Amino acid sequence: MKILVKDITSQLEDLAPIEYAESYDNIGLIVGSYDQRIQNILITLDLTEEIIIESINKKCNLIISFHPILFKPIKSLTENSFSERVIISAIKNNIAIYVIHTNLDFIWEGTHSYLSKLLQFNREKVLFPKEGIMKKLTTYVPISYAERVRNSLFEAGAGNISNYSHCSYNFDGFGSFMGNEKTKPFSGKKGVFHMEKETCINVIFPSHKLNIIKKALFTSHPYEEIAYEIYSIENINPYLGIGIIGDLTEEMNEYDFLIYLKNRMNLPCIRHSPFTGKKIKKLTMIAGSGSFGIETAIKEKANVFISSDLKYHDFFKSEKKILIVDIGHYESEKCTKHLLKSFLKKKFFCVSIYESETDTNPVKYFY
Ligand SMILES: [Zn+2]
């Protein structure tokens, strides 16, 4: 079976919509063609020249990278920097490069889902819910068609609120219209004022599903001209955003917790603030650089905050209220390789999917 780059990217974008990525991010297909046929796939945290060599050796012509190799626009493509050499080498060897980054961090099934399973804690909600991602649709449907339109909207992804699906608000009333000579009204006659018993249906949906929702409305609604309103709402989804907060299955003292963390995540070392003397039960975590989350973790009365790239002064913020832990940037995100591999393996059987074996961590530890 022929698998193209676009078959893979559409599955990844169903999992982690590109609209969820941070504005500074650079995700999606950055080298190659959507119509390129896939041989094998290599998944990596970072893109380096060694990763291109590994990809060639494993006959992979699609690399999926978590970290973008390009953040800023480049003005030239010479061999002056490693990122330019990687891009040139990928093009010469017909290797496509796809990046899935902060959009994978933001989804409930993403980076933090894997970490919570690894550390066996129950996730309660995200630490920083993403704003501006919800919309509301109001439409007016002849009563006999209300069920059909409502179900069509639900199937397209509308009406989900936390653990509830099929959520809508409906009320009946009268709609009025009068079509001109060019119309073919669903009920009534053209040129004649008409009152129709209608149901007003209200549903919310995630912004990235706008086109799918509109299509569902247009194909299920019987009217020639459909009256509807779509507007942005400020509601947040507690399961969509950055970081995570949750409870450990069993509380432990801080020393035992650090041993547990080190073993479960296979960490070479841990940097941490002074022990608080309290038990660890409520845990907060941000994979990658997360120093901005310390104050929120304290407000949430968490016992521990785990992240990376913390500065000297960040550890002072603990004030014995919380144990602040830095596990290393690479270490906090390397799980994304397993996460993406297991997701794609369930969807595509006829290509080999590899996790890169190259250690791309630019930080080395000297004991
Ligand atoms: Zn990162």
Image (cartoon, rainbow, N blue to C red):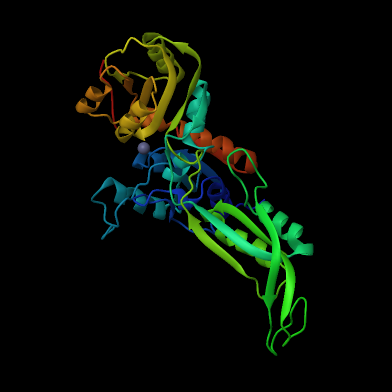
Q: Residue at x 41, y 15 (%)?
A: 280
Residue in the foreground of this view, choosing between 109 and 196: 196
Numbered circles on residues, count: 0
Position of residue 117 measured from the top left corner of the image (x, y, whole percent):
53, 25
Position of residue 94 measured from the top left corner of the image (x, y, whole percent):
45, 54
Residue in the foreground of this view, choosing between 54 and 32: 32
Give the side of residue 38 with respect to residue 142, left or right: left
Q: Residue at x 44, y 21 (%)?
A: 282
Residue farthest toward the bottom in the current orientation of the protein? 181
Q: Residue at x 75, y 57 (%)?
A: 147
Residue farthest toward the right in the current orientation of the protein? 144
Residue in the foreground of this view, choosing between 179 and 27: 179
| Image quadrant occupied by the C terminus | top left
Q: Quadrant of residue 330?
A: top left
Is 294 situated above or below 275?
below
Residue in the foreground of this view, choosing between 158 and 174: 174
